[in-house]
Image (cartoon, rainbow, N blue to C red):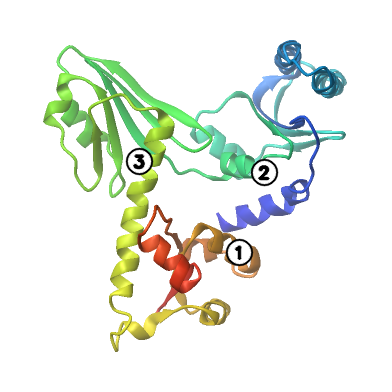
Amino acid sequence: MDQELINFDETFSRYGNMSDKYQSQYIFVIIGITAEVLIEKIVKMITIADNISNPARKTYIKSRLNNFTNTLTNIPDQSAKINGIYFVSDNIDYFELTGYWKNTLNIFGCSGLLSKYDDVFCIDWLKNLLLDRSYISIIHVKNTTIKHVHLGLTKRKVVKETTKKQLDLLEYINENKQQEKMTIVHGVSSALKNVNDSDTLKVFNSDKREDELMHEYDKFVNEKNGKQLEWWLDRIADPKEGRKIVFGLEIKENIECEMLKIIFCSPERAKKIMSKFSTKFPNLSDKIIIVNSYGNDIGNRLTVEFKGAIGIKFY
């Protein structure tokens, strides 16, 4: 995974600082559709752009998308399926979808056209889309219908959707929940009355939006990470365990000596550490545990007292 991250950064980092007006920096990810079909989809986008109220922005966006369709019409075999990425700006660049990137999209059953646009190229969106295979297991219940979804930040996959008159929700959950990871169940059904929260199961007796479920999952993971960090901080004065704890300038020294098994980081500090050391130490991300702050909590203490990072040595 770390090598894939390096490959991604080497390929796309140059696009990170490119900007333009009118949210006109487009990334198009095409999975298994022909140039003919893709052109139809872009033409629909051009038609929708007719509704833009700002005349200058309308003209600018339509011109850029029309230029893209002109490029697509020059593809020799219009019936061949495309699997690739287009960066569309003043210039148009194309990259094949192969290997790890393509496999990640296949795992989630992604197909067709995925796109993102802004004043800058949305590189973080593309990175998550192509590299991140993590997901939350979500089971939605409505009366006697179950819909089971694997939800990631940029993609989702419907695992199963079924309706049964005699719905044994607890049996389905036990057969399908992730081991040692949280499964979220939500919805409106009498079947939910027999399902209770546990260390790996969170139950909401109401319908939740997917962004709300993502937030609940983030809080759950953060709570577990925070408890692990607290365990170490409670032992900072311990003669045996305390000697394993490092922070400040010692973080850099111990990374370079490959002495750390865990690094608790704020999100900001984690980005700085990865930016500085990931090329030399490609497995470094496996050691980083993110601890966010939601107020006056352990995440805030990590940021304020330890400048966002605490390392734990092997011995």
Query: Separation of disc 2 and disc 3 at Cα?
Result: 25 Å
Q: Which residue is mark 3?
A: 216
Q: Are marks 2 and 3 in contact (CB under 8 Å)?
A: no
Q: CA distance from mark 1 to mark 2?
A: 17 Å
x and y percentages locating residue 103 in the rendered image? 56, 38
Q: Which of labels 2 and 3 is toward the front?
A: 3
Amino acid carrying label 1: it is Lys
Tell which circle, 1 or 2, labels the residue nearer the N-terminal end. 2
Looking at the image, is mark 2 or mark 3 earlier in the sequence? 2
**Image height check: is 305 above or below 14?**
below
Residue holding disc 2 = 123
Depth check, front residue: 291 or 241: 291
Which residue is situated farthest in the front direction here? 296
Q: Name, please, the residue furthest toward the bottom.
A: 239
> Judging from the image, what secondary structure is the residue with disc 1 in?
helix
Q: Locate residue 234, reporting x and y percent.
A: 28, 75
- In the rendering, which numbered label is found on residue 293? none
Measuring from the top left, give residue 202's x and y in whole percent.
25, 39
Please tell me whether residue 189 is drawn above or below residue 252 in the rendered image. above
Is 8 on the left-hand or right-hand side of 60?
left
Q: Amino acid at mark 3?
A: Glu
- Mark 3, other Cα within 10 Å: few <14 / some 14–19 / many ≥20: some
- Up-down relation of residue 311 to residue 228 (above or below): below
- Residue 68 lies left or right of residue 300; in this view the side is right
* Residue 288 horizontal side relative to residue 32, left or right: left
Amino acid bearing label 2? Ile
Residue that badge 1 annotates: 272
Q: Nearer the viewer, mark 1 or mark 2?
A: 1
